[in-house]
């Protein structure tokens, strides 16, 4: 039995869109293509980015091979090397993770794309791939002759090229994986034992549903869905504005401490079910989605569980001892995402709710240590007045006298980041959160019976 491999399409799979604009720019720089763009070129690439491959566009691309007649092969190779360097940063973040995941599992990692070999082979070298299956343009003595040398790597031609490569390299296709967005890559996907649809075009989405093929998006963490190319959380955040929540007033400070891009951890105290809404408004202002670590009970709840999953939350089953939630959070952070964690784990009850000393679990320290991401403290105050724990719903009738919710964000917490310092680092994070709360939060007092009652579920 041969070894396994993972075959990846390039455009709209490893890349979010088309490689064409970057390749064309490089060809113009080396003088192969005319300086002026072809009329309608930008429109064609835009349509491709939006809906993927169409038969007319691919037939046009195939005819374009003839237009390469007379091109200097050495110049094209220089353009390919230039384009490859520019394409590497465009590889989707979770695409890079997926490549490494297959490498770690001992599989060969291979690109299979219609794009010309002059571009794909330098790109494959830069990505450290084990192979590149792409369209080779024919040439005579270093000058392109307008023909295809071998398979035109598209549709059935791509499957044939993959099968030939697999036979040459003793690859067992039944144990292999293939990734593509395109309806026309069904032959390649059908050739392997583990087909995966990535960022599907409209027809491929139907095919994936009918055949039961898994669907992934490589610009978001594993398991995060998209509807019409839009992540549900982004759609919700776009509609949620403080003005649309008349039963609460909001005061935000320090949001500018949070980075505009790159992975980071937000650690917040926990006072109410309404905390998630307040943090969501912070993310809306920042313009970034967040991955919340949420307890298993939320995922198991009817309706709410489906919503939590759609929002890209990470399930935490505290009784299982599984490291899976931490691994998923690290993966999200390495992909440049924001991860939100509430170190207290659950809303404190009774006298503990009024304890000025916040006590957190060490998950936040372990996550920071394993990911290397910065931890930004976020202090919440007043959310319990909008949605006390003894109420099944927010107090939405408090419109005339709406309580104020204070949300404060601090700069990154300085941590030791060693296994021996997990407890101390957790205390540093909780101390930083406490420092963002109003003065009354740091004073010990005896709560009334009514206040205590509000801290328990009804």
Image: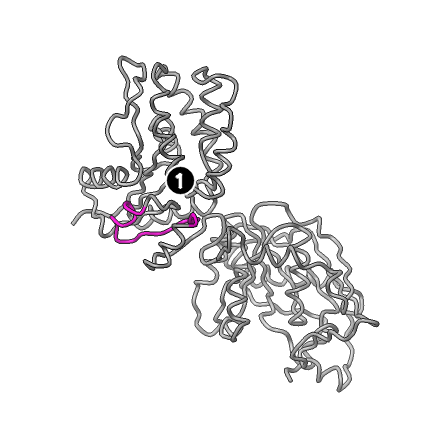
Q: Quadrant of residue 356?
A: bottom right
As drawn, which residue projects farthest toward the front? 56
Residue 190 part of the magenta segment:
yes
Q: Residue furthest left?
A: 1
Tell whether 458 sits left or right of 182: right
Q: Quadrant of residue 340?
A: bottom right
Q: Residue at x 30, y 37 (%)?
A: 130
Residue range of the region highlighted in magenta in the rendering: 186-202
- Quarter of the image for residue 72 reads top left
Locate residue 284, reporting x and y percent: 66, 54
Instruction: Give x and y (percent) for residue 389.
Output: 67, 78
Using the image, determine if residue 415 lies above or below residue 42: below
Rendered residue at 46%/15% (across/down) = 31
Question: What residue did someone put label 1 on?
Answer: 54
Is residue 250 toward the left or the right of residue 343 in the image? Answer: right
Identified at 40% across, 20% down, the residue is 78
Depth check: give the residue in front, 404 or 418: 404
Q: Is residue 384 left or right of residue 17?
A: right
């Amino acid at each position: 039995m041969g070894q396994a491999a993972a075959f990846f399409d390039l455009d709209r799979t490893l890349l979010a869109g088309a490689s064409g604009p970057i390749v064309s720019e490089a060809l113009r720089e080396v003088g192969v293509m005319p300086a002026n763009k072809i009329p309608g070129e930008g429109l064609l690439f835009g349509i491709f980015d939006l809906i993927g491959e169409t038969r007319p566009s691919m037939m046009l691309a195939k005819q374009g091979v003839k237009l390469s007649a007379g091109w200097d092969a050495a110049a094209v190779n220089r353009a390919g090397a230039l384009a490859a360097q520019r394409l590497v940063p465009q590889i989707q973040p979770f695409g890079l993770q997926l490549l490494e995941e297959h490498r770690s599992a001992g599989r060969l990692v291979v690109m299979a794309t219609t794009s010309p070999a002059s571009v794909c082979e330098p790109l494959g070298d830069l990505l450290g791939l084990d192979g590149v299956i792409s369209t080779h343009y024919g040439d005579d003595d270093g000058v392109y002759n307008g023909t295809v040398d071998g398979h035109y790597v598209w549709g059935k031609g791509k499957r044939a090229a993959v099968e030939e490569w697999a036979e040459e390299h003793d690859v067992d296709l039944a144990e292999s994986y293939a990734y593509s967005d395109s309806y026309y890559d069904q032959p390649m996907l059908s050739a392997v034992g583990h087909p995966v649809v990535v960022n599907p075009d409209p027809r491929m989405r139907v095919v994936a549903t009918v055949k039961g093929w898994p669907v992934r998006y490589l610009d978001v963490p594993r398991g995060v869905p998209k509807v019409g190319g839009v992540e549900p959380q982004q759609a919700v955040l776009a509609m949620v504005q403080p003005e649309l929540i008349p039963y609460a007033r909001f005061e935000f400070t320090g949001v500018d401490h949070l980075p505009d891009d790159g992975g980071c951890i937000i650690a917040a105290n926990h006072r109410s079910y309404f905390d998630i809404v307040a943090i969501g408004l912070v993310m809306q202002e920042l313009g970034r989605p967040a991955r919340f670590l949420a307890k298993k009970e939320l995922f198991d709840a009817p309706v709410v569980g489906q919503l939590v999953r759609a929002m890209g939350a990470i399930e935490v089953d505290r009784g299982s001892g599984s490291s899976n939630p931490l691994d998923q959070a690290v993966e999200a952070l390495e992909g440049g995402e924001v991860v939100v964690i509430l170190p207290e784990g659950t809303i404190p009850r009774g006298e503990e709710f009024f304890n000025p000393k916040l006590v957190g679990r060490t998950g936040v320290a372990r996550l920071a240590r394993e990911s290397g991401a910065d931890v930004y403290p976020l202090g919440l105050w007043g959310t319990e007045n909008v949605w006390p724990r003894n109420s099944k719903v927010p107090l939405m009738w408090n419109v005339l006298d709406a309580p104020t919710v204070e949300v404060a964000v601090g700069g990154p917490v300085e941590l030791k980041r060693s296994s021996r310092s997990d407890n101390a680092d957790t205390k540093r994070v909780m101390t930083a959160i406490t420092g963002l709360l109003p003065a009354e939060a740091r004073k010990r007092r005896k709560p009334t019976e009514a206040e205590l009652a509000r801290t328990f579920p009804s």
